[in-house]
Amino acid sequence: MSDLFPALRSTPDRPALHFPARSLTYGELAAVAGAVARRIGAASRVALWAAPTPHTAVGAVAALLAGVPVVPLNPKTGERELAHIVGDSAPTALLAGPDDQVPAALEALDRITVDLDGGADRAPQGAAPLPGDGTGIDPTAPAMVVYTSGTTGPPKGAVLSRRAIATSLDALEDAWAWTADDVLVHGLPLFHVHGLILGILGPLRRGAQVRHLGRFSVDGVARELGDGGTMLFGVPTMYHRLAEALADDPALVKALAGARLLVSGSAALPLHDHNLITAATGRTVVERYGMTETLMNTSVRVDAPQPRPGSVGVPLPGVELRLVDESGAPVAAYDGETIGEVQVRGANLFSGYLNRPDATAEAFDGDWFRTGDMAVRDPDGCVRLVGRRATDLIKSGGYKIGAGEIENALLDHPGVREAAVTGEPDPDLGERVIAWIVPTELDDPAARPSADALAAHVAGLLSPHKRPREVRFLTALPRNDMGKVMKRALRE
């Protein structure tokens, strides 16, 4: 597992990376990443300015070849948060492209420019790309420190080992039948697990090709999938834009229909977008479930008999998963109704939070990681997430209600474009269900569905106790870079 990228030595002529301005074969990638790795040398830790460019991909590979932990930095991070991340992780150098303009907080670091023209044109076939190409490194050694969003305090650095990364990527190879012949298309940011580890390191570990759009666009997806792309990674915001464009874009319909695998993650994909894409293309979007600290936990498998919208599939090979109730007792029911917190264990788990042994200890129940996500298990073992314990588990009238299932029910109403559900204190019920709605007809208040109509709609699809007691209309829901609704902002 210490050799994360065997294709760098074995298949030098195969395409590896394609960005709008530059492409690299595996041989070229081995040469340029090897040259950068030599410059990294024996650094204790390096930061990576993770812009959506080939320099980020090369920099990440170089650090992993050198066996030096890398800290991806979001270029949009604010001054205070960036200073915290740099101070906490204490990198000794910064990897960045030659044209990257970095903030003052990074200027004191030794800058290592990622030169795409450095090194030989290609590594000789069968030769290691550099002395000690990452092999021989302890597989439990840190590979990356990825900072969480910090919703309850300053971001924490999750330390991911080489073994955790390899284990998770290899489990997805099994679930998705991922091979060297696949061509992955995506336009995700490159500072987190989804875009960088799954979207860049995943194809490179397989010996496959990744085509990054630089910036997501509907036209870019249609072009790259239509030109031989076989897989697409995206978040719900991206799939929503694709779904809305299908009616007027036959080239997009053909491109999506021709893809082998469409994968959505980082947040739940609304039911109506699932339905629009399937109706137009005949393809079902596969959902998977993971987080920074665990990498990937579950996925709908490509060989699943009937993939169901709303399901994140079954535990991946090597991942143990259980649900527990509020007392910590395992939930044995596979009835699709009994809610419990998801806990997982396996080689995919992070090694702990950097410099935070207290937070690491609090995050575990024995050797089980507490995800904070609430879910139910269907009779076939598939997992359906219903929300976060802190924000999405609503206790109303003696019932435990997951916000996610109500949101999906609301999105099934033709008058609803976007929906979020929260709980608020109620003197009678304990908490009451609040629906935040972006209506389909933004410019015509008279055309908006009434609160009573939406409550009746939810009660008819689910149960009366799950109906929203109050409906609040908005022009847009507050979302982060990954398309997740920021429910704390709604409450504020």
Image (spheres, grey):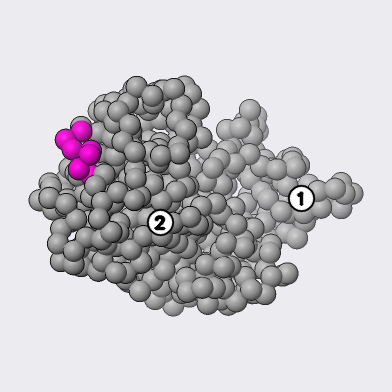
Would residue 284 appear left or right of 64 to someone viewing this image? right
Q: Find the distance from the CA under tag 2 to the CA under tag 1.
A: 33 Å
Q: Nearer the viewer, residue 80 or 321?
A: 80
Q: How many C-alpha atoms fall within 10 Å of the one at disc 1: few (<14), some, or many (≥20)?
A: many
The residue wearing badge 2 is 199
The residue wearing badge 1 is 439
Query: At which x and y percent is residue 73?
Result: 40, 36
Q: How many C-alpha atoms fall within 10 Å of the one at disc 2: few (<14), some, or many (≥20)?
A: many
Magenta stretch?
37-43
Quarter occupied by residue 269: bottom right
Q: Three-letter amino acid code at disc 2?
A: Gly
The structure residue drawn at horizontal position 74% and vertical position 41%, both measured from the top left corner, is: 474
- Asked whether residue 118 is drawn in magenta, I would say no
Query: At which x and y percent is residue 261?
Result: 46, 70
User: Tag count in the figure?
Assistant: 2
The structure residue drawn at horizontal position 16% and vertical position 52%, both measured from the top left corner, is: 130
- Asked whether residue 39 is drawn in magenta, I would say yes
Residue found at the very far right of the displayed protein: 446
